[in-house]
């Protein structure tokens, strides 16, 4: 059974940084798979933020986080990270880790994702 557990959320002021972690069990991040981070703010639809093809190393970001967020993974720890810098109030949301059975993130954050974590809250104040 695949489980994804996120951590690292919290409250920060604008301009601050947070690093989210997602530990996977029953699923190997180093195998030919695609991992992603999504977010959902109150009253808004969930949106894909970043994705990572763990074998070929390609990364994908939505325009609003390019240059500020970095997705990475540690195969030894079976963990995916989202480093978030220069945070803005508009980044406030529940952040979810997701895993795909696809061989790569062929469609970036639009790649079908099959497994989801419970989420970790990020709040950015101005």
Image (tube, grey):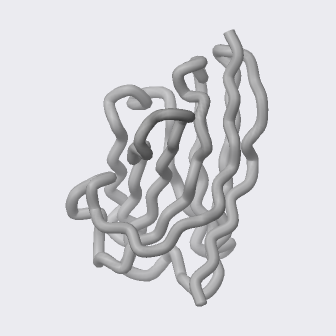
Q: Name the residue nearer the viewer: 116 or 68.
A: 116
Q: In this view, does 78 lie to the left or right of 68?
A: right
- Taking 112 as reference, is 59 above or below it? above
Q: Which residue lies furthest to the front in this view?
A: 43
Q: Where is residue 119 in the image (x, y as percent from the top left)?
A: 64, 54
Q: How many labels sit on residues?
A: 0
Q: Residue furthest left?
A: 106
Q: In which quarter of the image is the N terminus?
A: bottom right
Residue reaching furthest top? Answer: 126
Whole-percent x, y for residue 55 in the image: 37, 71
- Residue at the image position 60 percent from the left and 65 percent from the top: 117
Quadrant where the image shows the C terminus: top right
Q: Residue at horizontal 43%, vertical 45%?
A: 46
Q: In this view, does 7 lie to the left or right of 96?
A: right
**On the rendered structure, is 2 left or right of 5?**
left
Residue 54 at x, y percent in the picture: 42, 67
Say above or below: 74 vs 64: below
**In-front residue for pair 58/35:** 35
Give the residue displayed 49% in from the left and 28% down from the top: 68
- The residue at the point 60 percent across, 53 percent down is 81
Residue 36: where, in percent of width, then height?
Answer: 45, 57
For residue 4, above or below residue 19: below
């Amino acid at each position: 059974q695949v489980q994804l557990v996120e951590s690292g959320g919290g409250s920060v002021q604008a301009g601050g940084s947070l690093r989210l972690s997602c530990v996977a069990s029953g699923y190997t991040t180093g195998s030919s798979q695609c991992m992603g981070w999504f977010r959902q703010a109150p009253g808004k639809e969930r949106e894909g933020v970043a994705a990572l093809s763990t074998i070929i190393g390609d990364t994908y970001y939505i325009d609003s986080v390019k240059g500020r967020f970095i997705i990475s993974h540690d195969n030894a720890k079976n963990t995916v990270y989202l480093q978030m810098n220069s945070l803005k109030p508009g980044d406030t949301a529940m952040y979810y880790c997701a895993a795909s059975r696809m061989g790569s993130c062929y469609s970036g954050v639009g790649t079908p994702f099959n497994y989801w974590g419970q989420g970790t809250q990020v709040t950015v104040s101005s």
